[in-house]
Image: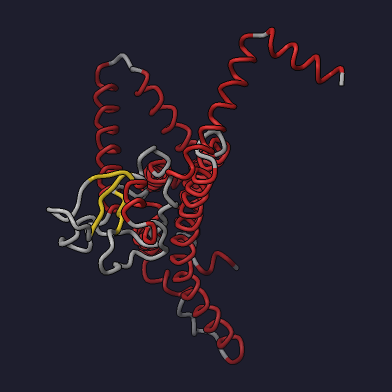
Amino acid sequence: MNKLVGFFTNLVQDPRRRNITLGVLVLLVGSIILKPLMSSPHVSLAAEPLLEHGPAWFTNALLTTLIVDIILIVLALATRAGLKEGVPSGLVNFMEMVIEALYGLLENVAGKNAKRFFPIAATIFLFVIMSNYSGLIPGVGSIGLYHGAEKEGGHAIILDNQVAAADEKVAFSLFPAEEEGHAKFVPLLRAPSADLNVTFALALITMIMVQYYGISSLGGKYFKKFFNFGGKGFMGAIFGVVGILELISEIAKIISFAFRLFGNIFAGEVLLAVMAFLVAFLLPMPFYGLELFVGFIQAFVFMMLAVVFFSTAMVGHDDHH
């Protein structure tokens, strides 16, 4: 009891603690008051077309991908221009630190092949981490268009909670299906990593590069690990089956790459949306920190697995024995 009294006494006497406590209480009470006005979280498993009567391929994830690409290109050009000036700025110093760290890591993993792998590996890392973090920007997923509304023009840029007021039934949907007579909310932006099309394309490109490095290093002997029927008798059959399993493994890596990245980022976005719906203020903050960590780890894992696959593809079948 004395400790509790002492705590409240210090709280009243210390303006800093008092202001922080009052701020937290105001935010929590505000979350409770505003909850009836908030919409249900909008969740769509697939990326959604932005234009109601436009091409289906022009989705919110594609728009965000283009923005991420432009940012990376501008960042690269700005870094190069800063290096030419002779006096590096803060941005140039930061990018130089990132590039040196990535190259040093690749040297430890790939050895003499680090210089060869570095352009594609660094590109993968920077694109994936920017894609992951784009979904954490306020407004991404909550500001967008609505389709099928009884308004002139058929769509407008609005907030998610305004859509829910028009039609609460379509505020939460796992699949972007149209409902006749209802307004359907479509976010303007969506993190590229939360779209299976993007992660699958990235995984496919990565595995194509794996085959390229293997063929360029070993030539026709590279295919020996997939189609090895040179043995005699029982061992020949075993080598043949192992080769087929290796081929299946190469295809499985594409699926594993795509779903690992998509699953982690999409699940994180759903978690943040649910936490923000339950308590709008303060509660989502720890989860934002967690998603920052997960976004970095997923980009790092994707890059490191790609480098490991590049390296193993350049090792001949006979070198394993």
Q: Which residue is pictured at 55% across the width and 32% down the height?
A: 29
Q: Quadrant of residue 5?
A: top right
Q: Farthest residue in the left direction?
A: 152
Look at the image and tell me whether residue 36 can be seen.
yes
Q: Nearer the viewer, residue 158 or 37?
A: 37
- Residue 49: give x, y in percent of width and height: 25, 59
Look at the image and tell me whether residue 213 can be seen.
no
Q: Quadrant of residue 74?
A: top left
In the rendered view, tell whether residue 132 sits above or below residue 222: above
Q: Which residue is pictured at 22% across the width and 64% down the height?
A: 56
The answer to whether 287 appears left or right of 306 in the picture is right
Q: Which residue is pictured at 40% across the width and 62% down the height?
A: 173
Q: Nearer the viewer, residue 122 or 138?
A: 138
Q: Quadrant of residue 221?
A: bottom left
Quadrant housing the C terminus? bottom right
- Residue 171: give x, y in percent of width and height: 38, 56
Q: Farthest residue in the right direction?
A: 2
Quadrant housing the N terminus? top right
- Coloring scheme used: secondary structure
Q: Farthest residue in the bottom direction?
A: 233
- Residue 33: give x, y in percent of width and height: 50, 37
The answer to whether 271 appears left or right of 166 in the picture is right
Q: Which residue is pictured at 44% across the width and 71% down the height?
A: 251
Q: Nearer the viewer, residue 207 or 255?
A: 255
Q: Nearer the viewer, residue 178 or 321?
A: 178
Q: How many marks?
A: 0
